[in-house]
């Protein structure tokens, strides 16, 4: 989708998604959010027939708004470490 953007953490509830992303300074947050919503909406409609029916003729499945907040360096570093640790553990479980 966007190879320059790294998903550090992802969490969700019934009606919202929380993501901690590492976005290069050259990219606008609004462009990343729009791309994410467009791609995931298309993929979910493709995978789940009930969503195709429910959102037939609609522009998308997501609400128009979003909230972007900056994380402190400590939050980012701990998220990066957890992400890398998980990748290492995942690789070890495959061997």
Image (cartoon, grey):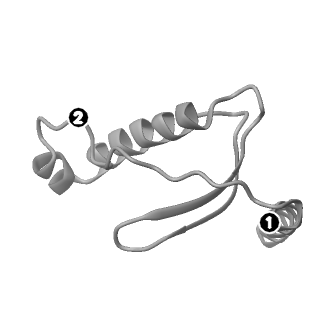
Residue 32 position (above or below residue 94): above
Describe the element under mark 2 as helix, strand or loop.
Answer: loop
Name the quadrant of the C terminus. bottom right
Q: Residues within 10 Å of mark 1 (few under 14, many from 20)?
A: some
Residue 8 position (above or below residue 86): above
Proximity of marks 1 and 2: CB atoms separated by less than 8 Å: no
Q: Residues within 10 Å of mark 2 (few under 14, many from 20)?
A: few
Name the quadrant of the N terminus. top right
Residue at screen point 51% across, 53% down? 67
Residue 93 position (above or below residue 50): below
Residue 61 coordinates in the image, percent (x, y): 27, 47
Q: Nearer the viewer, residue 71 or 3?
A: 71
Looking at the image, tell me whether mark 1 or mark 2 is earlier in sequence order. Answer: 2
Rendering quarter of residue 39? top left
Residue 34 coordinates in the image, percent (x, y): 46, 35
Give the number of the disc on residue 3: none
Residue 8 coordinates in the image, percent (x, y): 72, 58
For the residues labelled 1 and 2, the Cα–Cα distance comes to 33 Å
Residue at screen point 71% across, 54% down? 70
Q: Nearer the viewer, residue 72 or 56?
A: 72
Q: Is residue 28 left or right of residue 70?
A: left
Residue 23 coordinates in the image, percent (x, y): 72, 40
Residue sitting farthest toward the top: 26
Describe the element under mark 1 as helix, strand or loop.
Answer: helix
Q: Is residue 41 left or right of residue 28?
A: left
Q: Nearer the viewer, residue 85 or 13?
A: 13
Q: Which residue is mark 1?
A: 79
Q: Which residue is mark 2?
A: 59
The number of discs equals 2
């Amino acid at each position: 989708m966007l190879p320059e953007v790294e998903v550090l953490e992802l969490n969700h509830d019934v009606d919202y998604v929380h993501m901690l992303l590492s976005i290069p300074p050259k990219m606008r947050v609004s462009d990343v959010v729009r791309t994410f919503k467009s791609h995931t909406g298309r993929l979910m409609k493709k995978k789940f027939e009930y969503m195709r029916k429910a959102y037939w003729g609609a522009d998308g499945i997501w609400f128009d708004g979003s909230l972007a907040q900056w994380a402190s360096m400590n939050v980012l570093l701990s998220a990066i470490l957890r992400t890398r640790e998980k990748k290492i553990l995942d690789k070890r479980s495959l061997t």
